[in-house]
Amino acid sequence: MTAYAVIDLDIADPDGFQQYIDGVTPLIERAGGHNVLIDDDALVLEGDWRPATLVIHQFASKAALQEFWDSPEYQPLKELRRRYSTVKVVVGESA
């Protein structure tokens, strides 16, 4: 079952955040994931959720996504991401 990480991303320092992007992109690809969507002008139809940037990553399964998230290679990049941005992340899996 395909899993999706839905990310509400607010970048505080674009130049610094680029370091994160450069490091995380190959890790996502090695884990079998890819970007489905990056949108800094998401259309809100209802409610008060207003993501600065809406990001969606696709992985083969929740297990594959969790393995990427917990991988030793990703841990220093999480710290880098936290230094230059604020995120909210949820994961869903299609039936």
Image (cartoon, grey):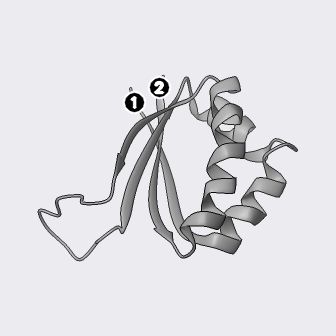
Q: Is 22 or 29 nearer to us in this picture?
A: 22
Residue 49 location in percent, x, y?
Answer: 29, 72
Residue 6 location in percent, x, y?
Answer: 44, 50
Using the image, tell me which numbered label, if any, was put on residue 17: none
Q: Is 16 or 29 nearer to us in this picture?
A: 16
Give the farthest residue toward the left. 45
**Cα distance in 3D space between marks 2 and 1:** 5 Å
Asked if residue 43 is positioned above or below residue 11 in the image, the reply reads: above
Label pair 2/1, CB-CB below 8 angstroms: yes
| Residue located at (66% from left, 66% from top) | 16
Residue 47 location in percent, x, y?
Answer: 19, 72
In the picture, the quarter occupied by the C terminus is top left
Number of other residues with Cα within 10 Å of mark 2, as a class: few under 14, some 14 to 19, many 20 or more = some
User: Element at badge 2?
Assistant: loop
Check disc 2 and report the residue beneath it: 2
Identify the amino acid type marked 2.
Thr
Asked if residue 77 is positioned above or below residue 73 in the image, the reply reads: below
Quadrant for residue 63, please give it: top right
| Residue located at (74% from left, 63% from top) | 80
Asked if residue 20 is positioned above or below residue 44 in the image, the reply reads: above
| Residue located at (51% from left, 69% from top) | 11
Lower sequence index among marks 2 and 1: 2
Identify the amino acid type marked 1.
Ser
Check disc 1 and report the residue beneath it: 94
